[in-house]
Image (cartoon, rainbow, N blue to C red):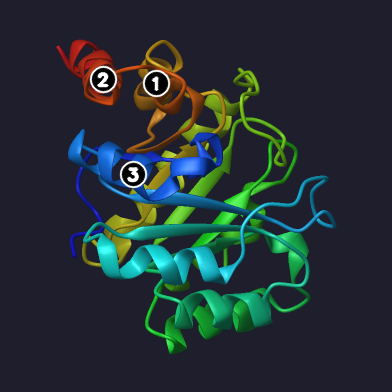
Amino acid sequence: MTFLKKIQIAPSILSADFFKLGEEIQNVISAGADWIHIDVMDNHYVPNLTIGPMICKSIRPHIQVPIDIHLMVEPVDQLIIQFAKSGADIITFHPEATRHLNRSLSIIHEYGCKAGLAINPSTSLNHIQYVMDKINVLLLMSVNPGFGGQKFIPSSLKKLSEARKLIDNWSMENNGQSIALEIDGGINSSTITSAFSAGADTFVVGSAIFETSNYVKAINSLRESINLNKA
């Protein structure tokens, strides 16, 4: 599987119709999704309760695109193992949710998955300084985690720009190794343009896809917004 294409759209199934979840996932992949993003919440780290490893395990045999797990849980280590065994390709967690950041990242790699670190709107980027060699994805939250359908926080753009510089500088010092810069929260055909300009290359999108009647049109609109900005 290819993890690090230039632009990647990762629909979040948190906004899907759970009555027909399998159909929703197949339809969004047919419409051009690059990853499937699964938001895992525990009603402890965040005030919501969502999806467990069984859902990931059920999805895995039926799709070929990477499954991108975002753990909004505390503690994380046991769920890292459970999701890795259930077929996850990418597992991302928050630094506040573990006492030993390096160890938790190492567990992800030990189980054969790509590792990501998620940074909340008020969390410093300093957390990544000494673990960049262990992360494949840096996920910046542009809303406070816990619920879908929230509005994009504009100050996230400054942090995106700072993260882009950190990643590019690290990449140049490490033979061009890549880290995907993912943005999650309030992404639609309007906000994706500024997020791309600030440096994001991977976009988690929920309601802007699943709350439309035409997933192909929705995903194409997102890509067109980026392409217009490139021109």
Q: Nearer the viewer, residue 81 or 171?
A: 81
- Picture residue at 45% right of the left edge, 89% below the top: 110
- Picture residue at 50% right of the left edge, 52% below the top: 38
Tell me the SS state at disc 3.
helix
- Dot 3 and dot 1 residues touching (CB under 8 Å): no
Q: Amino acid at mark 2?
A: Ile
- Dot 2 and dot 1 residues touching (CB under 8 Å): yes
Q: Which residue is mark 1?
A: 192
**Circle 1 Cα neighbour tier, 10 Å, few/some/many (<14 / 14–19 / ≥20):** many
Tell me if residue 17 comes above or below residue 230 in the rendering: below
Q: Amino acid at mark 1?
A: Ile
Q: Position of residue 74 (x, y in %)?
A: 78, 66
Q: Position of residue 128 (x, y in %)?
A: 57, 60
How far apart marks 2 and 1 lie (CA) works out to 7 Å
Tell me the SS state at disc 2.
helix
Q: Amino acid at mark 3?
A: Glu
